[in-house]
Every structure is written in C-alpha cells, then in structure tokens.
Image (cartoon, grey):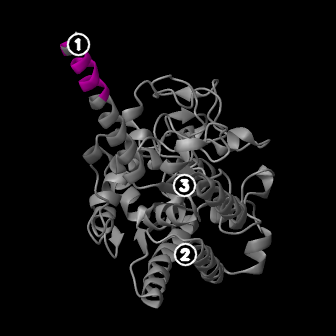
Amino acid sequence: MASSLALVSWLVLVLTLAMAVSKTQVEAARAFFVFGDSLVDNGNNNYLATTARADSPPYGIDTPSRRPTGRFSNGKNIPDFISEALGSEPLLPYLSPELNGDRLLVGANFASAGIGILNDTGIQFINIIRMFRQFEYFQEYQGRLANLVGTTEAQRIVSEALVLITVGGNDFVNNYFLVPFSARSRQFSLPDYVRYLISEYRKLLMRLYELGARKVLVTGTGPLGCVPAELAMRSPNGQCAAELQRAAGLFNPQLVQMINGLNSDLGANVFIAANTQQQTNDFISNPGAFGFTTSKIACCGQGPYNGLGLCTIASNLCPNRDLYAFWDPFHPSEKANRIIVNMILRGSTNYMSPMNLSSLLALDTIPRI
C-alpha cells in the first residue's frame, strides 16, 4: 500500500513538473506580430465583407485539411515559416474569436489583403484593415495582453517580439498603375511617387517603434512586373512589365536607405530590410535551380499565364504545386514562400540589410528551459 502511494505521489510530481516546464516554455517563447497585405494575411479578411478573400477552394489545397484558411496560398505563407523558425505555433488572425487566453502570448496577425502604405490604396476592396487600423488593433491587443499578464510583462513581451511588416506592392499594382491616368499617376511622376511612399512608410515604421516594437523585419516589394497577372495584362512577349519593374527598382533601394537612416537615428538595429525583389528574381530568372518548371505561369488561374481574374474552383489548376513559383496570379506558392523565408533567415547582405533574421534573433536569444 505504501509503495502504491509513493508511486502515485511520484507520478503527480512528474506531471506537475512537466506542466510547469511546458508553461515556462510557452511564456519564454518569442511572440510574433505581423502587419501588411495579402502576402502575409492569415485570414483576417475572412471576417470582413470584402472581395479580397481567400476563403474558397482551391486555396489551402495543400494544408492538412485541404481546406482554405484565408491565406493567399496553396498552403503555408511567409509568417507560417517564420513561426516554425521561432519554434512557435502558427499565428491566429487578430479577428479570430479563438485568439484569447494563452493564445495571446504567441502573438497575432493583423494583416489584411488589399491594403497599402497609403489609405487610398485598394479602395476597390472597400472593407479592409488599413495600416492605421492594424496599429489600432495592435494597441487593443496590448491592452488585452496586459489584462492577462500585467502591464510590465506585456511590455516585455512586445519589446522582445519579432515584428514582420510587408506592405508596398499594392501601392503600385492597386493604385498608381491600377488604371491608366490614375489619380496618383496624375499627381506624381513615378520617382516622386516612390519618394512619397518611402516618406509615408517611414511614418508607419516609427509608429511601430512608438508602440513598443524593437525587432522589426521589413520586406520590400517583389519584382512587380514579373507576376503572372502583370504578364497577362501588360506583356505580349512574356517579358516582365518594364514600368512596374522600374517602380520596384526605385522603391527597394530607397527602402533600405530609409531603414539604415532610421537605425542610425535610433542608435540601434531595430529594423532589418529583406530584399524580396532580389530573392524572387533569383527563382524567376532561373526557376530550374530551385526545382520549379515555370516562374511565369500561375498554378491556379485562367487566361495567358493563368494570370487573369481570381483563383477559383473553376480555374485551371496544376497537379503539382511544387513545380510552380506562383500559386495564383499574384502570390508565391508554398514552396516559393519557404525559399523566401530561408533567405530571410540565412541570406547574405545581398539579400538582407544590415543582417539576416537569424543574426538579429541571436543578439538576444531568449533562454528556454
């Protein structure tokens, strides 16, 4: 009898220690916050009355459930692979009713498809979460987190968290170049428009800093003129659309310059820039080197390059998504997203400035039990 009681006591002790270790690991894990557009939206737009949604098949075809998740992907997107690198579970969209209790400790995704740096970008999508509103939600989140763990601990979680912001592409494709003689193209020459965007982006990054962010990964635009949608609309010969490529070529170097200046002003490497244009150019110019058979044709779509309209159940659908750099007319495939994140994590200064993400996170690695 005594030995049975001892065994029970021992099992209770082991279970208690295991639960304590598990709780400590969750609390010690680095939180992750995401802001931006459809490249990083994890499903916020599913809760909004907007056409900018990825809530219908065949989106999500390569997830375990084979069902759409709100990600503009056949499977995982960039935040999902970064979460894996952090050793965390995938983020929930901020509007998800499941985001409560201990799930708040993991972080949240505030991104919304269709938005841009400017508030007039994506007006055709009507009900989307523009950047100023994403930041308001972030403030709201911090209040909820403080109610859970206390103000001091909430501030620590936010300051030690990784923040990803991906925005800017829509300011070209869904604003300046959306229609001929758009309002912004009549207001600005392209170089002046880029300078204006960079000045507005700087304000967004400073607002993130004011809200407590201290480790911010900032991605530039991809090669805008090379996505299947732009090839279908602007390229009779399959060459990347020159004016959109010019836009990306102006925007990305100025973004890096602005970020370097911000870090200098702040006296710390708060922001790191990912040259996603160069990253994506690599597998667009040489798809075979990355295991792709094409970087021009979308897996899901219709028309030239499968680049017209939306990806729907009636669209052409490739049988093997891993052979395609683009999943739909605008968005990379899951495999391409994995390649992009690998370069963000480990890339040289050709891709990352002033350092890659692994180096940034190693500066203050949070110990785990």
> Is label 2 in contact with label 1 (beta carbons under 8 Å)?
no
Q: Secondary structure at mark 2?
A: helix
Q: Which amino acid type is marked by label 2?
A: Tyr
Circle 1 crowding by C-alpha within 10 Å: few under 14, some 14–19, many from 20: few
First reached walking from the N terminus: tag 1 or tag 3: 1
The residue singled out by tag 3 in the image is 149
Camera-near label (3 vs 2) is 3
- Measure the C-alpha gap from mark 1 to mark 3: 39 Å
Q: Earlier in the sequence, mark 2 or mark 1?
A: 1
Residue at figure coordinates x 75%, y 60% from the top left: 179
Residue most toward the left?
3
Give whichever of discs 3 and 2 has the lower sequence position: 3
Q: What amino acid is labelled 3 in the image?
A: Val
Q: Amino acid at mark 1?
A: Ser
Within 10 angstroms of label 3, few (less than 14), some, or many (20 or more) residues?
Answer: some
**Is residue 264 visible in the rendered structure shown here?**
yes
In the image: residue 346, left or right of residue 266: left
Circle 3 sits in a helix, a strand or a loop, which is it? helix
Rendered location of residue 69, percent (x, y): 58, 33
Q: Residues within 10 Å of mark 2 (few under 14, many from 20)?
A: some
**Tag of residue 318:** none
Residue 164's x, y, as percent? 49, 60
Tell me the residue that label 2 is attached to: 209
